[in-house]
Image (cartoon, rainbow, N blue to C red):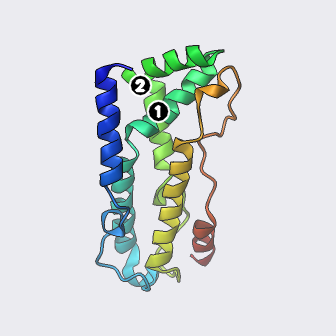
């Protein structure tokens, strides 16, 4: 590993260790009480919650670890050995091809209100429940980041390795809205 790569790894590790503490203040607007229903805050309130969270997701999941997951998948599928996979992975990380960039966007877009069937009007789910749902979707993104390694080189990946299953916290909202 060259000196620049080491410095970037140390800087990234420091940023993760000392950065965002995961507090909801960055993920959600603080103007809504968690026990208020989506019907009470209306569609514009729900949109504000969704947009704030989706901005947070874009900021959090454009990191090098997330790019590494997509590049690792690409390298696994295009090589036969772990060594070749590592070389291909590094090439992708240095200059991600458009298909990897597109996949990153597609994966990231799953963690937001656009993936849910929720309308605020008449919805008895609370702000806290939508926040729990969105947090669960974010947790699923975390799982995607860390599931692939070059040890799988030469194997065929499941086509849906990057697809997020609807968390239970979100299913309950969809049924109550």
Q: Position of residue 134 (x, y in %)?
A: 48, 63
Left or right of 119: which side holds 77?
right
Residue in the foreground of this view, choosing between 70 and 113: 70
Is residue 95 visible to the viewer in this orientation of the structure?
Answer: no
Which disc number belongs to residue 68?
1
Is residue 171 visible to the viewer in this orientation of the structure?
Answer: yes
> Which residue is depicted at the point 35% across and 73% down?
45
Residue in the foreground of this view, choosing between 26 and 9: 9
The kind of secondary structure element at disc 1 is helix
The image quarter in which residue 158 lies: top right
Question: Mark 1 Cα within 10 Å, few/some/many (few <14, many 20+)?
Answer: many
The kind of secondary structure element at disc 2 is helix
User: Distance between the Cα atoms at labels 1 and 2?
Assistant: 7 Å
In which quadrant will I find the C terminus?
A: bottom right
Sequence-first disc among 1 and 2? 1
The image quarter in which residue 7 lies: top left
Q: Position of residue 160 (x, y in %)?
A: 65, 40
Q: Position of residue 129 (x, y in %)?
A: 50, 75
Q: Position of residue 125 (x, y in %)?
A: 52, 80
Q: Is residue 116 above or below residue 129?
A: above
> Which residue is depicted at the point 63% across and 39% down?
161
> Which residue is depicted at the point 35% across and 34% down?
9
Left or right of 165: which side holds 44?
left
Question: Mark 2 Cα within 10 Å, few/some/many (few <14, many 20+)?
Answer: some
**Callouts 1 and 2 close, C-beta under 8 Å:** yes
Which disc number belongs to residue 60?
none
Q: Is residue 64 above or below residue 18?
A: above
In which quadrant will I find the N terminus?
A: top left
Q: Is residue 107 above or below residue 93?
A: below
Mark 2, residue position: 93
> Which residue is depicted at the point 38% across and 56% down?
54
């Amino acid at each position: 590993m060259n000196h620049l790569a080491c410095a970037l790894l140390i800087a990234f590790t420091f940023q993760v260790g000392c950065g965002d503490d995961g507090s909801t203040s960055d993920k959600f607007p603080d103007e809504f009480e968690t026990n208020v229903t989506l019907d009470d805050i209306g569609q514009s309130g729900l949109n504000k919650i969704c947009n704030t969270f989706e901005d947070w997701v874009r900021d959090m999941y454009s990191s090098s670890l997330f790019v590494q997951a997509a590049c690792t998948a690409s390298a696994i599928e295009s090589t036969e050995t772990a060594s070749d996979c590592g070389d291909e992975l590094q090439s992708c990380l240095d200059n991600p091809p458009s298909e990897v960039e597109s996949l990153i966007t597609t994966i990231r877009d799953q963690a937001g209100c656009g993936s849910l069937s929720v309308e605020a009007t008449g919805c008895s789910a609370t702000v806290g429940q939508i926040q729990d749902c969105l947090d669960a979707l974010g947790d699923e993104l975390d799982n995607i980041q860390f599931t692939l390694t070059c040890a799988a080189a030469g194997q065929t990946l499941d086509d849906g390795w990057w697809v997020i299953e609807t968390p239970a916290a979100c299913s309950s909202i969809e049924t109550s809205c």
